[in-house]
Image (spheres, rainbow, N blue to C red):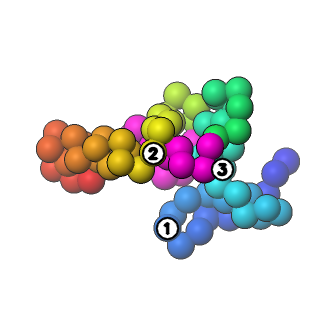
Amino acid sequence: MAKWFINKKGYRRFSDSGNSVHRWVAGKKLGRPLRTEERVHHINRDKLDNRPSNLWVFKNQTEHTKAHRRDKKRYGFW
């Protein structure tokens, strides 16, 4: 079983490589490694919930930020 830690920003990372668990899970979901510019969004905003159904991949940071702005309007927080 892979070992992980939670970084200062609250995301799980693999202990051996330092890679983000959510990016790895999202890549497995898509069947390919993520491109550097792609961003992964936690739909329920829980950074530790890395279920594939909770991850949404955006093509870049601009698109990801738009989702956060929509959430802020809908729910009152980022």
Q: Which residue is mark 3?
A: 21
Label 3 close to label 1 by CB (< 8 Å)? no
Q: CA distance from mark 3 to mark 1?
A: 13 Å
48 falls in the magenta region: yes
What amino acid type is highlighted by mark number 2?
Answer: Asn
What amino acid type is highlighted by mark number 1?
Answer: Lys
Q: Which residue is mark 1?
A: 9
Crowding near the residue tagged with mark 2, few <14, some 14–19, many ≥20 C-alpha atoms within 10 Å: some
Look at the image and tell me whether residue 27 can be seen: yes
In percent of width and height, residue 61 lies at 41, 50
Chief SS of the magenta region: loop
* Foreground pick, 63 / 25: 63
Q: Please name the residue shown 68% across and 44% down the image.
A: 24
9 relative to 69 in the view: left or right? right
Q: Please name the residue shown 53% across and 44% down the image.
A: 38
What amino acid type is highlighted by mark number 3?
Answer: Val
